[in-house]
Image (spheres, helix red, strand yellow):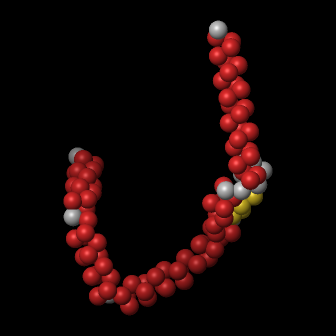
């Protein structure tokens, strides 16, 4: 029963936000400007509390299927590299070849 209520409440909140988007944004911006210094201070404190965790996450290295290595913060740049795009093209071609072979076997 509580799940149904929370689900309904989420749907209602989403619909209310969509119907009153400008009003909601205006209210949030007013609240921010009223408590601007508190918001800034909170952000600074939060960063200082989680700094080590954030840096650890940012410096974690990943190895891509294409053979490239990237960190969390440079993933988007890696996806755009020639090496990664070439790997995806070769993967797509091999998948097409497999599908064609399967179709030929069926016929």
* Quarter where residue 51 is shown: bottom right
Quadrant showing the C terminus: top right
Q: Which residue is drawn at 68% across and 69% down?
A: 59
Q: Residue furthest bottom?
A: 37
Residue in the foreground of this view, choosing between 9 and 104: 104
Q: Residue at x 70, y 19 (%)?
A: 101
Classify 34 as above or below 2.
below
Classify 22 as above or below 102.
below
- Is residue 62 at all visible to an observer of this figure? no
- Is residue 70 at all visible to an observer of this figure? yes
Classify 11 as above or below 38.
above
Residue 104 percent across, percent down from the top left: 68, 14
Q: Which residue is drawn at 74% across and 46% down?
A: 86
Residue 92 percent across, percent down from the top left: 68, 36
* Quarter where residue 48 is shown: bottom right
Residue 91 percent across, percent down from the top left: 71, 38
Q: In this view, does 45 lie to the left or right of 25?
A: right
Residue in the foreground of this view, choosing between 89 and 33: 89
Count the marks: how many?
Answer: 0
Q: In this view, does 29 lie to the left or right of 56?
A: left
Residue in the foreground of this view, choosing between 83 and 2: 83
* Quarter where residue 35 is shown: bottom left
Residue in the foreground of this view, choosing between 85 and 29: 85
Q: Residue at x 55, y 76 (%)?
A: 50
Residue 63 percent across, percent down from the top left: 73, 54
């Amino acid at each position: 029963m509580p799940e149904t209520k929370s689900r309904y409440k989420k749907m209602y909140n989403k619909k209310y936000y969509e119907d009153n988007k400008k009003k909601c944004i205006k209210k949030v911006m007013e609240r921010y400007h009223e408590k601007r210094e508190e918001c800034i201070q909170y952000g600074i404190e939060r960063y200082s509390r989680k700094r080590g965790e954030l840096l650890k996450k940012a410096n974690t290295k990943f190895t891509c299927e294409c053979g490239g290595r990237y960190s969390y913060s440079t993933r988007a740049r890696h996806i755009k590299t020639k090496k990664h795009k070439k790997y995806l093209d070769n993967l797509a071609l091999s998948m097409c070849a497999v599908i064609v072979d399967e179709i030929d076997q069926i016929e």
